[in-house]
Image (spheres, rainbow, N blue to C red):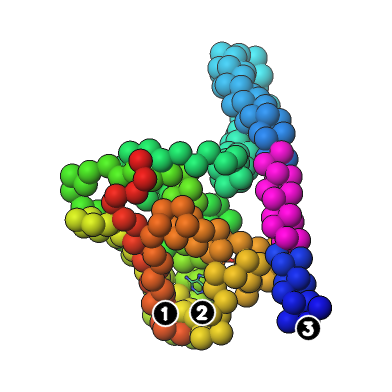
Amino acid sequence: MTTDELQQIEHLQQQLHNQEKMASLGMLSAGIAHEIQNPLNFVINFSKMSEKLLDDLMDIVDECKEKLGDDDAEEIIEISEDLKENLSKIEEHGQRAINIIRSILLQSRGKDDEFFATDICELVHEYVWLSYHAMRANDKNFNIAIKEEYPQNMTKKMVVPQDLCRAVLNVMNNACYTVKEKETLAADKDYHPEINVKVVDGEQDFSIVVTDNGMGMNDEVRSKLFDTFFTTKPVGKGTGLGMSITNDIITKKHKGKILVDTIPGEGTTFTFIIPNSLKK
Ligand SMILES: Nc1ncnc2c1ncn2[C@@H]1O[C@H](COP(=O)(O)OP(=O)(O)O)[C@@H](O)[C@H]1O
Ligand SMILES: [Mg+2]
């Protein structure tokens, strides 16, 4: 065997290994997500019920105020207000966890690659905000100006909605991350994080365009962008899977193209171009 062949085998082995890792990771996280959903629903529902019970309790306290004396009544009201606040925190954060789990389940759902006539603008809008809220859930103080531009009366397109939404989510998540990173590093206090989202309808194809004014990419990052497991993010923040999956979804499944325009320090525009006449 030549060294070339050996190298090729090694490369294929590595690829196989990566794919296996990816598949088992996906199954594992889907399984965990599913199992966590039920107990989380319990947490949220019981906290809602407790809030109602607390209201009932306060009505009773109100009725027997005279019997209680001012000090006691005041203390009871104070404690109950604290309790209420705690319950609403439990509910809020439980809801947050549920949202995260929903997006994990969505990402790892089976191999349903069915094409459906889909309202692209609705899909894009929904996932743009899903990504935004997921990010905001981690950092309430972080604000991004999100601008959206959609054509009116766009006909439905044949796409695999489950996959296309993942692609939108992946690009949006990266956009949110990069503007946030830039804000954190920004020397100029005049920096305003901004993400523009646009859908363009054409005769032959339609496009989804996402522009951020974040960090941009240098040539090295740009050239590895679509590689499986390539990430510049710290452990726990990035998996390096997003863009490689997105590339498969757009170029392989939807026979489309991804254009990347990026200027280091200025920002990036991702354009998905998807033909209108896909296999039905
Ligand atoms: N909008 C963007 N701006 C700057 N860099 C980006 C952007 N999108 C992707 N990248 C770069 O490409 C890398 C790979 O992205 P991705 O495949 O989504 O993996 P991950 O987000 O887990 O790192 C990122 O780590 C980042 O360096
Ligand atoms: Mg990503």
Name the secondary structure under disc 1.
strand
Of callouts 2 and 3, the N-terminal one: 3
Which residue type carries mark 3?
Thr
Q: Name the residue under label 2.
A: 222
Q: Point out which mark residue 218 bears.
A: none
Q: Which residue lies furthest to the right in this view?
A: 1
* Spatial CA span between label 3 and label 1: 37 Å
Classify residue 148 as left or right of residue 50: left
- Mark 2 vs mark 1: give the one in front: 2
Q: Name the residue under label 3.
A: 3
Q: Do the residues labelled 3 and 1 touch (CB within 8 Å)?
A: no
* Quarter of the image with the N terminus in it: bottom right
Q: Which region of the structure is painted magenta? A: 16-31
Residue located at (72% from left, 67% from top): 12
Q: Point out which mark residue 262 bears.
A: 1
Classify residue 247 as left or right of residue 44: left
Spot occupied by residue 240 in the image (x, y as percentages of width and height)? 62, 66
Q: Do the residues labelled 2 and 1 touch (CB within 8 Å)?
A: yes
* Spatial CA span between label 2 and label 3: 29 Å
Spot occupied by residue 180 in the image (x, y as percentages of width and height)? 51, 69
